[in-house]
Image (cartoon, coloured by chain):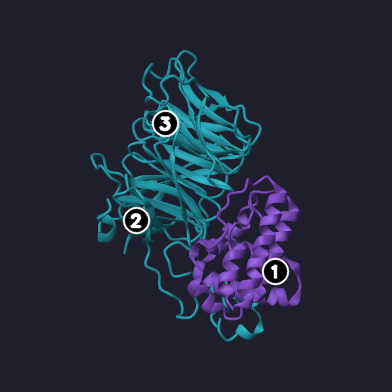
Chain colours: A purple, B cyan
Amino acid sequence: MAGHEEFVEADNAEAIITRIEHKSRKIESLLKQSKPVEALKTALEGSPPKTRDERCKSANWIVVHRAIMAIKDVDGMFSSLDPEYYDILMKYLYRGLATGDRPTCDQCLRIHEKLTERAGLGCILRALADTVNTV
Amino acid sequence: MAAVSVHQFAQCITCHAWSPDHTMVALCPNNNEVHIYRYSLDKWEKIHVLQKHDQIVSGIDWSSMSNRIVTVSHDRNSYVWNQEASEWVPTLVILRLNRAALCVQWSPKENKFAVGSGAKTVCICYYEQENNWWVSKLIRKKHNSSVTGVAWHPNNILLATTSTDGKCRVFSTFIKGVDPRGSGTSVSSDSKFGEQIVQLDLSFSWAFGVKWSPSGNTLAYVGHNSMIYFVDDVGPSPLAQNVAIRDLPLRDVLFVSERVVIGVGFDCNPMVFAADETGIWSFVRFLDERKISSSTSKYGSQFSEAFGKLYGQTKQGFWNDAIEPSRPRGGVHENCINCILPLKKAGDAIVKRFSTSGLDGKVVIWDLENQTDISSYL
């Protein structure tokens, strides 16, 4: 994908947070250009699942949340989102549903329905059963 | 239709095993007994009830050459049953477990059997002629959680195990006096009993249902996260493939040939996986042709109701077949399939028929002979 090719060790929290800030700026610019699907892909990419640091996970969640809320056309999004992103998106949808915040939950639910149709129940299973790589 | 015969034996079947000539089946109807049925004159009749265990019988295996049945149970015991005249006589095997036994399998030469347990150990039992009893040797190390599945490699030495800690491990079970020296492959020839050959760290959730391919070159096992893992060249540098499953997880697998695997599980429908010429595995199709209940509902009534509630009131008109939650889903099995066994005729190189049993209490026999698209992979 465009941009972030640098490989950062998973255990360096500071480096990860800096990378997430980079991503955040890129996402803002993509959203201004009305490219919400690109923004979502950038947000989901390089999600740091192997780190145990809650700050990294929260920082990435904020970025992904911003991209998710900006999606208006859910069906259109799926036509250009590659299947490799389905599993990680499902994990973030559950994190969104866990917040309990009304607009977030509405949006996440809308996307969840379409994602389940596309990816099947196996996608939900993988998001729920994986307790090691959490988001 | 791939399913050639369906029989309802009980309300729920924990596990089953076939006699050497496939005329009798031993199964556990979810209690502490083992029922043996024989097929005669077009129907099944119950001919024996083996009652020795105190708790549910979690594993049964019937050896094809020596005609012995081994049963293991949650009561931490195991019995080897020998047929004398018309009765089955049990011999207690002291496993030295402090937790339930979960699975059992005879080794290819039938001189040993392996038991997986909730005590994070695997028991390898062999017969000691001098004392006329079965001795159990434990593999205590390495497992961090219950051992859910065991599978013997064709060389009678290597054993693969799956555990609820998500890992699949291969051990050597070489026992002096039982196994001839130098009978292992290059990987296992210098190993001593209980030595771990390789640990496969592919799954992040419970692992089940491990099996070796007929040549012993490939290993397949499933994870509870709707994944199936295929590993070639099991050894110091294995080649692993993770195949994501679209639907619900599997519980057990069977190698029908070197390149075709059948997986069974919570979808109540056997799934066929095949490897192409380059060795890449992928899902082919479901074996059972199932009628789709309605054009809009993709998951059947059971899930429609749940999803209907999840997606809110506005969708109520959409899921109009959600009235009866436990309607049969149109397939042969109505509940999770948890056991799959080959029904191989002597002299056949590949498995053409196999049987499945599940929580719905049915045993179904499937035949791949008429499935032309799958036969091309075999």
Between the residue at mark 2 and the residue at mark 3, the CA separation in whole angstroms equals 25 Å
Element type where label 1 sits in the image: helix
Q: Chain of mark 3?
A: B
Q: Which residue is mark 3?
A: B107
Mark drawn on residue A97:
1
Q: Chain of mark 1?
A: A
Residue drawn at x 38%, y 24% as measured from the top left: B186
Foreground mark, 1 or 3, reads 1
- Looking at the image, residue B122 lies above or below residue A82: above
Q: Nearer the viewer, residue B98 or B38?
A: B98
B341 to the left or right of A78: left
Residue drawn at x 45%, y 80% as measured from the top left: B295
What kind of residue is marked 1?
A: Leu
Q: Residue furthest top?
A: B130
Residues at marks 1 and 2, common chain?
A: no
Q: Position of residue B29 (x, y in %)?
A: 52, 50
What kind of residue is marked 2?
A: Trp
Could you tell me if the residues under marks 1 and 2 are in contact, i.e. CB atoms within 8 Å? no
Mark drawn on residue B318:
none
Q: Position of residue B12 (x, y in %)?
A: 52, 55
Q: Nearer the viewer, residue A25 or B311?
A: A25
Element type where label 3 sits in the image: loop
Of the 4 image quadrants, the one containing the N terminus of chain B is: bottom left
Q: Which residue is mark 2?
A: B366
Mark 2 neighbour class, 10 Å CA radius: few under 14, some 14 to 19, many 20 or more: many
B6 to the left or right of B12: left
Mark 3 neighbour class, 10 Å CA radius: few under 14, some 14 to 19, many 20 or more: many
Q: Chain of mark 2?
A: B
Between the residue at mark 1 and the residue at mark 2, the CA separation in whole angstroms equals 42 Å
What kind of residue is marked 3?
A: Ser
Q: Residue furthest left?
A: B347
